[in-house]
Amino acid sequence: MRIPPYFYSRNFQRFFSGVIFGAIVSWLIFLYIFGHMQEDQVKLIHKQEERIADLVKEKDIWQEDFKKLNEKNKELLTVQSISLKITNASKYKIDAFSVFDTQEKIKKDISNVLAKDLTIVYNSRELLEKTIENKPVKLNGRTYQLTVTNMVIYTTLHIEVELSLAK
């Protein structure tokens, strides 16, 4: 079997040269389009990297603010001060200085709850009541017994106390 000599024919030479020329032109067009698309992709990636960097900075700022707020809230969830009020001192005609002095003594007795967590203070509220109620108070030559009527436990511990004559 013999292969026909196509390379001698002018029509085949034109066809093959057209195929080769077309392949070269199409390859150049392909390279141009591919390069343009890759350039667009690189620009998009750079924009996304910048946006990601901005978002990471923003996230860090938010997290820092969140940590500061957590610390502030942690501070707020402890007993910061004690407010004590004797409600019926006028009934027994006790002067204001004696009432103030008694309030300060009671505050001193229960001052260990300052800077404690609210849950700890809440769990030991009965102990606080007993501490206040079991201590008799001498005012103007009389002995009085204290009774806790109201106790609100929050960042400020509010306690209302009534006086009664001791038996």
Image: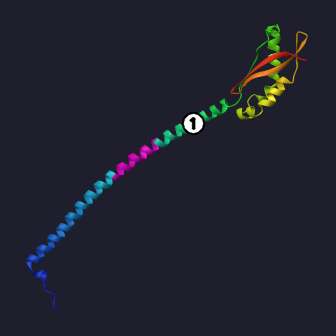
Q: Please check the rendered image and state whether residue 98 is part of the magenta-colored stretch, yes or no.
A: no
Name the residue beneath numbered marker 1. 66
133 displayed left or right of 79:
right
Q: Position of residue 29 (x, y in %)?
A: 22, 60
Main secondary structure found in the magenta portion? helix
Q: Nearer the viewer, residue 103 or 15?
A: 103
Q: Nearer the viewer, residue 34 or 71?
A: 71
Q: Residue at x 46, y 44 (%)?
A: 53
Q: Position of residue 30 (x, y in %)?
A: 25, 61
Q: Nearer the viewer, residue 153 or 49?
A: 153
Total labels drawn: 1
Q: Residue furthest left?
A: 10
Q: The residue tagged with tag 1: helix, strand or loop? A: helix
Q: What stretch of residues is rendered in magenta?
A: 41-54
Q: Position of residue 67 (x, y in %)?
A: 59, 37
Q: Residue at x 79, y 17 (%)?
A: 162
| Amino acid beneath label 1 | Phe
